[in-house]
Amino acid sequence: MIKRSSADFKDNSKIKEKKKLSKAEAYQKACHFCAYQERTQQEARDKLYDLGLSSEEVEELITKLIVENYINEERFAKSFAGGKFRIKKWGRNKILQELKRRNLSPYCIKKGMEEIDENDYLQVLENQAIEKSKVVKEPNLYKRKHKIATFLISKGFEPDLVWDMVKEKC
């Protein structure tokens, strides 16, 4: 065991102190942060707190960002749900859970979930099931279907849809 003296911990010169930004500088950084990709109010709020602003300043800037349309949670929900479905092939349950975790309003969540077309959703589920069935090398048919279904459910697809698809396609 290595013994350390208190002198080993006294060199704080390497610790960088955060410089408190002015409200105008923080606003510019927040605008850039929100313009780079869609953000929720909470993500922008956390960023502003990281920049060293007080709670009053943060709330004032959040209001300004909303008014100037840098932050729009409905737009975020639509973009998030559509992107996670199209790119990552997530199911509705996983997307819904993630939107709720980000503290979005039920209205925004509903609008986001409307981005997922039912026909596309079933097609993606079928494609995922077929792809996974090609990879699973289980000789026991029951265990094979179970592995495929478990994978699809973990991706956020509804269990009843998954089992119907697995019975039909695998």
Image (cartoon, rainbow, N blue to C red):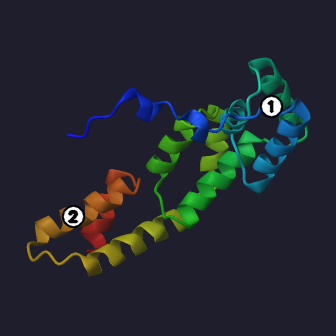
Vertical order, 135 against 161 (above or below) = below
Q: Identify the secondary structure beneath mark 1.
A: helix
Q: Residues within 10 Å of mark 2 (few under 14, many from 20)?
A: some
Residue for point 63% across, 35% down: 104
Measured as percent of width and height from the top left, residue 22 is found at: 87, 32
Q: Identify the secondary structure beneath mark 2.
A: helix
Nearer the observer, 34 or 94: 34
- The numbered mark at residue 149 is none
Going by the image, does 94 lie left or right of 19?
A: left
Nearer the observer, 2 or 144: 2
Nearer the observer, 139 or 62: 62
- Identify which amino acid the numbered label 1 is placed on: Ile
- Viewer-nearest of labels 1 and 2? 1
Considering every residue shown, the one lying at the far left of the view is 140
As measured in the structure, the alpha-carbon distance from the residue carrying label 1 to the one carrying label 2 is 46 Å
Measured as percent of width and height from the top left, residue 39 is found at: 70, 45
Considering every residue shown, the one lying at the far top of the view is 56
Residue for point 47% across, 69% down: 124
Q: Locate the N terminus by quadrant.
A: top left
Residue for point 27% across, 76% down: 133
Q: Quadrant of residue 139?
A: bottom left
Nearer the observer, 65 or 122: 65
Q: Locate the C terminus by quadrant.
A: bottom left
Residue for point 54% across, 61% down: 85
Q: Residues within 10 Å of mark 1 (few under 14, many from 20)?
A: many
Q: Is any atom of residue 117 visible in this view?
A: no
Measured as percent of width and height from the top left, residue 131 is found at: 35, 77
- Identify which amino acid the numbered label 2 is placed on: Lys
- The numbered mark at residue 62 is 1
- The numbered mark at residue 147 is 2
